[in-house]
Amino acid sequence: MRNNLPALGFGLGLRTEHYNAILDTKPQVDWFEALSENYMIPGGLPLNFLDRIRADYPVVMHGVSLSIGSTEPFDLTYLKDLKKLADRIQPAWISDHLCWTGIHGQNIHDLLPLPYTEETAKHVAERVKIVQDYLGRQILLENVSSYASYVDSNMSEWEFISLICEQADCLLLLDVNNIYVSSYNHQFDAKAFIDGIPQQRVQQIHLAGHQNNGDYIIDTHDAPIIDPVWELYGYAISKIGDVSTMIERDDNIPELDVLVQELQIARDLSANVLRAAA
Amino acid sequence: MTQLAKLQADFQAYLLDDVKSSSFIKAMIDDNKVGAKKRLSIYHDAYRLRIIEALATAYPQLKALLGDVLFNKIAREYITAYPSTYRNLRWYGSEMREYLLTTLAQHPVAAEMADFESALSLAFDAEDVPELSLQELSAIPPENWDALSFKFQPAIKFVRTRWNTIPIWQALEVEEMPPKPAQESTYQSWLIWRKNFNSQFRLTTEMEVIALNMAVMGATFGEICANLEVEMDEEQAMATAAQYLAGWLENGLICKVTLIKFAS
C-alpha cells in the first residue's frame, strides 16, 4: 500500500557543523533528517538549533538505538523520549534501522545484522507493530550495511525485508549506498535487491559515501557518493518513482555548500530518470 | 532461549570480550572473499574505535593531559570494565572519574579532570528553564525577602578539586603549556552552570557552596542569612547573602522565586 505521507523532495542529514550556515543562509535544501538520539536530551543548544531549523524546514527523525531486532523487551524510557521528541518536532516521519544494537541493557553502538529467517522476520514484525502502535504512526525501517552473514540465514535480505513489511505494515527507508556496500561484501546483485523489495513502501532514500578496502567496503559516510551508487540510485528511481531522497555525511564533513551541490546531482539524476520513464 | 536470543548473546559476548574468541566464528558464513574471522573483526574493531572516539570527544583535555597512547590504553580498558548502557554515546564515560581514581591513583589530576569535563558536558545538555531577572526580584518588597525561596537551573553542579586541575585544563584548552601538577592547600569548589547555552564555571568559597546548596534545597533567604550568622554578625551576614544572591542572579542560576508563607 502507498501511504499518505508527503513527498519532501531532496534533503540532507542535519549536522552540528552546519547549524549556523543553515540558519544564516537558508540553503536550497527541501528538508533535514535529524538523528533522534542527539536530541532526546533534556535541553540546551542542540535542541534549540533543531527548534529553529524546524521552524524553516520539514524535518524527519532518524534513530540508531531502537534495536528493533533485539530479543530483549523495549527500553520504555527510550520509546517515551522518542515520542516526546516527535511531539515537539512534529517530524514528517520517524525511521530507524533493521538491525539490533545490543542486549542485556547494553548498547554496542553499531547496527548489527540479523539472520534472515522466518522466525526473525516474525519477531521483528511483532516489535514493529508495538512501536507503531505506541507512536501512533507507521515507521520506516532502513536496510543496513553488513560485513558478515549468518549460517542460519535461509533467505535473501530483500525476502526478509518483504516479509517484515508485509507482516508489520511498515515503510522502508532504502539506503542505496548500503545496498551497494552489502552487495559488494556478500557478492549479490544490487539490482535484484531493489527488484525484490516492496517498492511501493519506500518512503525515503539514503545516499552516502563509503570506504573501499579492496576485498570489503566499510560504510563510513565520510566521502562523496561514488558513480556506481549514483547509477544504482537511478535504477531505484526508475523502479520506485519519485522518492524523498537525502545525503548522509557523518565524518570528514565538508562545508554545507559542498553537500548542497552533491544534492543537486541527485535532483538532476532523479529528474532525468523520471522524465525518461514518462 | 530462542535461537535468535542465543545468537545475539553469543555475538555480543564476542564483541565485548577484548580478546577475539574463536568459538562464535562458526555462526558466520566463511567464504573465500574475506573469511568469517576477518568479517567479525570488522565489528569487533569498530566497537572499540567508535567508543574510544566518543571518549576522546567527551574528555578532550583529559586526552591532551594523558597523551594519545595512555589515553587510548585507558579508554580500551574502560570499555571492557564499563560496557555502554547508554542510547547515546555522548553520555558514555560517566564513570571515568571513578575508574581513574583507582587505575591512575598516582596521577590524581586525571580523575579530577574527568569529573570536571563530565560536569561541563552534563550542564550543556541540561533542561532549559527561564532565567529570573533583576527586575522581577526588585519588584518584591524588602519586608518579604526573609521568606523568599528560589528555584535554580538544573545544570548546577559543584566539582571539588584538591589539585591545580582547572588551571591545567584552562591551559590545555587554549593549547598552552599547562602548569606542573601541584596539590592545593585546601579543597577547591568549582561551580558549574549554563548561561547562553554554554557551560560556565567559577571558583566559589566554601561559605558560598553551603549557602547555595541550602538555597537549592529550598532554604529561604532568611534561613541562609541565619546560617551565615554562625560565622559573622547579622549585618555582615545579610550583606554577604545579598552579595551571593546578586552573583547567582547575574550568573543566571535562578529560574524562579517564591514567597514562602509560614504557618503562624
Image (tube, rainbow, N blue to C red):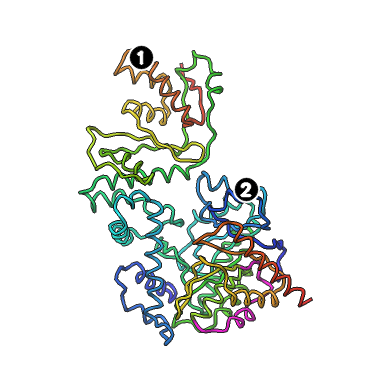
Distance of mark 2 from mark 1, alpha carbons?
50 Å
Q: Residue B45: percent from the left, percent from the top?
A: 37, 69
Relative to A86, residue A97 above or below: below
Per the rendering, the mark at residue A23 is 2
Q: Residue A213: percent from the left, percent from the top?
A: 45, 76
Relative to A211, residue B130 above or below: above
Q: Residue A8: percent from the left, percent from the top?
A: 69, 61
In the picture, measured across the screen, residue A10 lies left or right of residue B247, that is right
Per the rendering, the mark at residue A231 is none
Q: What's under tag 1, amino acid-wise?
A: Gln
Q: Are marks 2 and 1 in contact (CB under 8 Å)?
A: no
Where on the picture, by quarter, is residue A139? bottom right
Q: What's under tag 2, amino acid-wise?
A: Leu
| Neighbours of disc 2 within 10 Å: few (<14), some (14-19), many (20+) | few
Residue under the point 66% across and 51% down: A26
Which stretch did the figure color magenta?
A: A186-205
- Towards the viewer: B197 or B151: B197
Asked if residue A135 can be seen in this view, the reply is no
Label 2 element class: helix
Image mark count: 2
Q: Residue furthest front?
A: B176
Label 1 element class: helix
Relative to B150, residue B69 above or below: below
In the picture, measured across the screen, residue B119 lies left or right of residue B139, that is left
| Neighbours of disc 1 within 10 Å: few (<14), some (14-19), many (20+) | some
Image quadrant in which the N terminus of chain B is located:
bottom left
Please identify, in this view, whether the residue under mark 2 or under mark 1 is nearer the observer. Answer: 2
Q: Which residue is mark 1?
A: B236
Q: Residue furthest bottom?
A: B32
Q: Residue A260: percent from the left, percent from the top?
A: 63, 60
